[in-house]
Every structure is written in C-alpha cells, then in structure tokens.
Image (cartoon, rainbow, N blue to C red):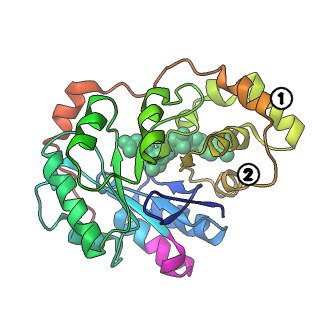
Amino acid sequence: MESIKLNNGVEMPTVGIGVFTFTPDEAESSVEVALKNGYRLVDTANAYVNERGTGRGIKKSGVAREDIFVSTKLWPTEYVNERAIDETLERLGLDYIDLLFLHQPTGDWKAGYKMLEQAYKDGKIKAIGISNFEGKYLDELLGVCEIVPQVIQVECHPYFTQSETRKITDEKGIKIMCWYPLGHGDKVLVNEPIFAKLAEKYGKTPAQIILKWHNQMGFIVIPGSRNPEHIKENADIFDFKLTDDEMAEIAKLDKGIRYYNGGEAELKQYATWQPEYEK
Ligand code: NAD
C-alpha cells in the first residue's frame, strides 16, 4: 500500500477504509476484510459508536499493530474530558493512536487541541488531525496552536475540491484526507461520463477512476464500503496513472458543491450532543 510522509516525518497510507454509519459488527467485518486485502489505514470516530467493533476487526485481521495506521476522532463533548483519549484507546483496544482528530470546530476546541498536543508529546498519538476546520476555524487554529496539525479531514471529491483550504494547507504541509471521496455513493457523481470513459480505457471501474484522481491530487482517501468486492476494488488503484489532460478534464467537474451543508446551527448542536458508546 502506498504511503506519504506527513510534516512530522510519520508515514501514512494514502488509501484506507472509513466506517462512518457502520454498526459495530459491520465495522468489525469490513475492517477485517480490508486489512486482509492489503489495506493499512482505518478511519473511525468516537461519534460512529463502533470503535470497539473496529478494534475487534483490527485484532481479527492478524496484521501486526505496527503495520496498521489507525485514525479516530474526539467528539466535542470529549474536549473537556481529561480521560477522553484513554477511554478512546480502551474502546479501540490499542495503546496508541496513529492519528487523532478533533472531529468538529465547536465546543471548547482550544482545550481539545491542547489535549491532543499533550498526548502527542506523551507518545499516545503519533499525529494530530483536525476535521471540518475550514475557513475561519482553520485560520484561528493555526493562530493558537503550538504544533501545526499533520492532517485535515474535510469533505472533498471531484464536485468540491477544497481549493480554498488547499491554499493554506499546501503552505503548512498539512495533508488533506477526504471524506465522502465518492460523494457518499452519489450515482450522479459516479456516473459522470468522464469516469465511464476512463474506466473503459484503463479497465477499471468509475469508482477506481475517482479514487485515482484523489490519489494523483495528493489526497488521502477513506472510501466506505461493507461490500467485500468494493473494498478490494477501492484499494486496487496503483497499477495505472491518469494523464495530465485527463486530470484537467476531471477538474472541470468542480462545481463548488458540497453534499453536507451543516453550518453554524449544526455545530451548535454538536457541542452538546453526547454519543452513547457501545459497551
Ligand atoms: P464515500 O464517498 O466513501 O461513499 C461510500 C458509498 O459509496 C458506499 O456506501 C457505497 O454505496 C459506495 N461505494 C463504495 N465503494 C464503491 C465502489 N467501489 N463502487 C461503487 N460504489 C461504491 O462516503 P462515506 O462512506 O460516507 O465516507 C467515507 C468516510 O469518510 C467515512 O467512513 C468516514 O470515515 C469519513 N467521514 C468523515 C466525516 C467527518 O466529519 N470527518 C464525515 C463523513 C464521513
């Protein structure tokens, strides 16, 4: 599996599996299938309420812990819980996390970020991430942080390529990790004629063409799938390369359109909503 170097020297795989909306059992089986088929990156979150299932999938895969890159996310209500990282580790059944995010720019995120910085210094986490910190939130965070984050996880796909965020992250050496890399499975995106044309040319599927575009953009992707065939397919993108002209053609699809438009009202709710963790 291909990897890239983060701004602190840590190596991170560029393709992983994401388990948003998965039950604990679905997370367990999908993570096991992915790791047994060459994946080395797994992305979950406190709020997905499947960290225990994800941890079971990691164990059942038989892949050595040090060969797997695990990312998860602290939910805003945890930013003021000084035991939050230890509790996350306990749910995952791990003794360190490769990349820990603040999931949302709400609640006392400055306290949350300090907690991540301390955990990084203590070796409990190997890299720091921020998720959904776009625009003013990214500016504010970079103004107050002691350690520049290594990764930002944001909505990103051919219809919305994060061109504004990239102006800042490119300068700071922060890598972009794309959520909804396949537009959350949106058929309109996946069925764009350009992807069918390139799929035919390269003997790949439209989903693989989209994931290859991400890869050549320098993005990290975590497509979600419960389907073992799709899981295998989504990591099988390293035996071909899109031409510059083809990348330019795909770039024309950027409509600046997001699938998720939560805004400030949702962020306010996120500040107090408490996940009910699996036992
Ligand atoms: P996605 O864009 O990865 O789309 C997944 C859907 O695409 C699947 O449900 C399936 O219907 C379809 N699909 C997957 N592989 C396919 C294939 N090979 N061919 C055809 N269709 C295929 O969206 P997602 O799963 O919702 O998001 C991916 C990950 O991003 C999540 O699991 C999670 O880790 C992360 N995420 C993070 C945030 C955040 O706030 N940080 C928000 C949403 C998602």
Q: What amino acid type should be assigned to the residue bearing mark 2? A: Ile
The span shown in magenta is 56-68
Q: Which residue is drawn at 43% across and 62% down?
A: 8
Picture layout, residue 25 above or below residue 275:
below
173, 65: nearer the viewer: 173
Residue 223 makes an appearance in the image: no
Would you name the residue on which mark 1 appears? 197
**Quarter of the figure that contains the N terminus:** bottom right
- Give the secondary structure at mark 2: loop
Q: Which mark is residue 237?
A: 2
Q: What amino acid type should be assigned to the residue bearing mark 1? A: Lys
Picture layout, residue 147 above or below residue 245:
below
In which image quadrant can residue 261 be found? top left
Q: Which residue is drawn at 10% across and 55% down?
A: 80
Task: Please state if 6 lies on the left or on the right of 37 as rendered.
Answer: left
- Give the secondary structure at mark 1: helix
**Quarter of the figure that contains the C terminus:** bottom left
Q: Provide residue 32's location: percent of width, then percent of height.
A: 55, 69
